[in-house]
Amino acid sequence: MKSFGWIFFVAAIGVLMGWVISQWMPAADRPVSLSDAPRGGDFTLDAPNGPFRLQAQRGKVVLLYFGYTFCPDVCPTNLALMTQALNALTGEELARVQGVFISVDPERDTLNRLTAYTNHFHSSLIGVTGDPDELARIAAQYGAAYRKVEGESQGGYLIDHSSNTYVIAPDGSLHLALPHASPAQDILDVTRRLLAQTQSDN
Amino acid sequence: MKPYFSRTTLFVLPLLLGSISTQSMAAADAADSVSVGDPYVRAVPPGQPNSAAFMKLHNNSTARHSIISADSSVAKLIELHTHVKEGGMMKMRQVKKIDIPSRGETVLQPGGLHVMLIGLKGGLKPGDSVSITLVFEDGSKKVIQAPVRKMKMTMDMKKRMH
């Protein structure tokens, strides 16, 4: 009986030490738990033809990109890649896919400007924007980051921004974030995979 | 009959030519030493205020050269820019100069260095050509003609097994 007590004592010490060490580890070194990952979620923003509600897109794969039209290179590159993927879809598939460009620069990006901009890429692409607080909330929801930078260019302020393409499944859940300049084939593959999944579910 | 060239001219002329050629070699300016390949400007939708020019810069000399500014009549303002990826964000930053190493190459391409055209005075349509003046560290200049190109909007059709 005495040895059993010892084993219990040692085990208890071990558990305690493990707990102490785990608390000591700086937060950054700890593996990110799933609850820390951005979850995405519904939002409503202004679009050229009235409010755009993500909720109304159920049944579609939504490709979401955060940017601004003054961006001369990074945004056009990603939107061109998204467009390449959209152009590779059949008409039937395309009817179940919605590309969305969220401008985080409502100060300069009017809805008219956004329309001219998205039409340059694909006629089905929609440009949306809205209240700065609402934009910040949606960006945080998706794990997108952006920051206004003054004084870098004489042409006006610039915006530093993350450059992921968020792929939203037909059930409205955030499926994955494709990194900056992901090849069109990657965008196409994940889109088709999600379309096929919902097809077989029905 | 009087010879067309005097004897002195005949004697001096080669020397003179020689000195000119050695002088021009010694004074080969940056603009002469740097060749520009495949320049293009990105087509932008109407009303879009900015665009960018990309190109390959090759330095044929043994000295390092730099582009310190650029100019073009199509935009109100031209700046040299680059992109840095930092903290998960793409950051566009102005650079003072773009170096081209001796006997080396510097590529201005999407996602990196570019000549930024700010405040476009008109639309840039595919097929247009934009004249850009590159200014080098020694003040020498090079004028290039960059065609306007629209980004590729369709994928290369590869044979894929399904």
Image (cartoon, grey):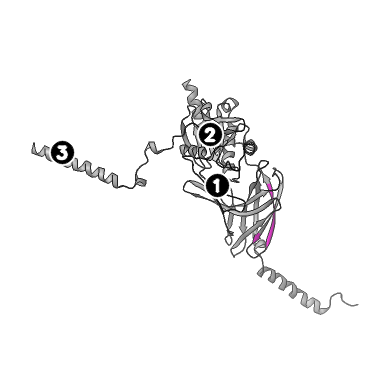
Residue at position x 67%, y 42% from top?
Answer: B47
Residue that badge 1 annotates: A159
Query: Is label 2 in a helix, a strand or a loop?
Result: strand
Residue flagged by tag 2: what amino acid is it? Leu
Residue B143 lies within the magenta run: yes
Residues tagged 2 and 1 counted as in contact (Cβ below 8 A):
no
Res. B119 visible in picture: yes
Pick the front one: A82 or B38: A82
Residue at position x 27%, y 46% from top?
Answer: A21
Query: Is label 3 in a helix, a strand or a loop?
Result: helix
- The CA span between labels 2 and 3 is 55 Å
* Labels in figure, total: 3
Residue at position x 46%, y 37% from top?
Answer: A141
Neighbourhood count class around disc 2 (C-alpha, 10 Å): few under 14, some 14–19, many 20 upward:
many
- The CA span between labels 2 and 1 is 21 Å
Return the disc, 2 or 3, that comes first in the chain's sequence.
3
Neighbourhood count class around disc 1 (C-alpha, 10 Å): few under 14, some 14–19, many 20 upward:
many
Residue B87 x, y percent position in the rendering: 46, 48
Return the disc, 2 or 1, that comes first in the chain's sequence.
2
